[in-house]
Image: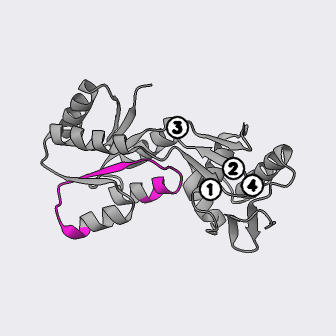
């Protein structure tokens, strides 16, 4: 299977050079100039690596990285015209795998991409005691080896909770992270989808009840199997 790389870069000349260099190496390149469009493409089709410009016109590359880290596990290379140490530190603290300062050689970027992909990206996440496995690359969640039949929003909700076990998410945070247009939906939509998720988990395993309700606060996913909502 051809490795899919997503590029979010608003300068067309730089994007063209990157796309050309990596396509020559056999990678499947997909380019977006806006952060929100890139995030939507990542949610819809996934990727094995993201090349992300820090200075985007609609939102900061750092904000893009914060958002994607809530629901995706993939390597990230930051591109920036700024070489300040603080920017590099912020990028690395957000989970970036590399940091390339403009101007740069496309050959250098290709070498960095190859090095990161050789290390391997996290493709699965297992939650002990629950039997839940998240195949990030294929956007599938399994319970005890059986792939769950989830709607788009059920998948996104469970993937977000799986990515940060024990963290309590408010309904508003879940709406903002999961729904494409939170303003067009109601917070009760979160409760409805959580209810359907619990039902689907119990269909496969009556003892599987990892989603906890925090009255007046929101929801979390527990590590321990003996915790009930």
Label 3 neighbour load within 10 Å: few <14, some 14-19, many 20+: few
Q: Quadrant of the C terminus?
A: bottom right
Q: Secondary structure at mark 4?
A: helix
Location of mark 2 (residue): 132
Residue 165: x percent and y percent? 62, 63
Q: CA distance from mark 4 to mark 1?
A: 13 Å
Location of mark 3 (residue): 44
Q: Indicate which disc, 3 or 1, sits on the residue closer to the N terminus.
A: 3
Labelled pair 2, 1 in contact (Cβ < 8 Å): yes
Labelled pair 4, 3 in contact (Cβ < 8 Å): no
**Mark 2 against mark 4, which lies toward the viewer?**
2
Q: Which residues are magenta?
A: 66-86
Label 4 neighbour load within 10 Å: few <14, some 14-19, many 20+: many
Taking depth in this image into account, of 2 and 59 the one nearest to the observer is 2
For residue 145, which quarter of the picture? Answer: top right
Labelled pair 3, 2 in contact (Cβ < 8 Å): no
Q: CA distance from mark 3 to mark 1?
A: 18 Å
Taking depth in this image into account, of 86 and 142 the one nearest to the observer is 142
Location of mark 1 (residue): 162
């Amino acid at each position: 299977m051809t490795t899919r790389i997503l590029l979010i870069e608003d300068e067309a000349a730089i994007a063209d050079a990157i796309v050309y260099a990596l396509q020559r190496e056999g990678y499947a390149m997909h380019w977006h100039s806006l952060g929100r469009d890139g995030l939507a493409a990542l949610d819809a089709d996934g990727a094995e690596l993201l090349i992300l410009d820090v200075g985007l016109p609609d939102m900061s590359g750092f904000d893009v990285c914060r958002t994607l880290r809530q629901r995706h596990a993939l390597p990230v290379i930051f591109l920036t015209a700024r070489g300040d140490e603080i920017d590099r530190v912020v990028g690395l603290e957000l989970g970036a795998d590399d940091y390339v300062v403009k101007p740069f050689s496309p050959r250098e970027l290709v070498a960095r991409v190859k090095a990161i992909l050789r290390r391997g990206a996290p493709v699965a996440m297992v939650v002990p005691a629950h039997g839940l496995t998240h195949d990030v690359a294929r956007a599938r969640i399994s319970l005890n080896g059986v792939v769950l039949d989830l709607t788009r929003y059920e998948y996104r909700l469970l993937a977000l909770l799986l990515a940060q076990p024990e963290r309590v998410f408010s309904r508003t945070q879940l709406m903002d992270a999961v729904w494409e247009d939170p303003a067009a939906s109601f917070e009760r939509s979160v409760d409805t989808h959580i209810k359907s998720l619990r039902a689907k988990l119990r269909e496969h395993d009556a003892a599987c009840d990892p989603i906890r309700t925090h009255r007046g606060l929101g929801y979390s996913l527990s590590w321990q199997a003996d915790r009930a909502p």
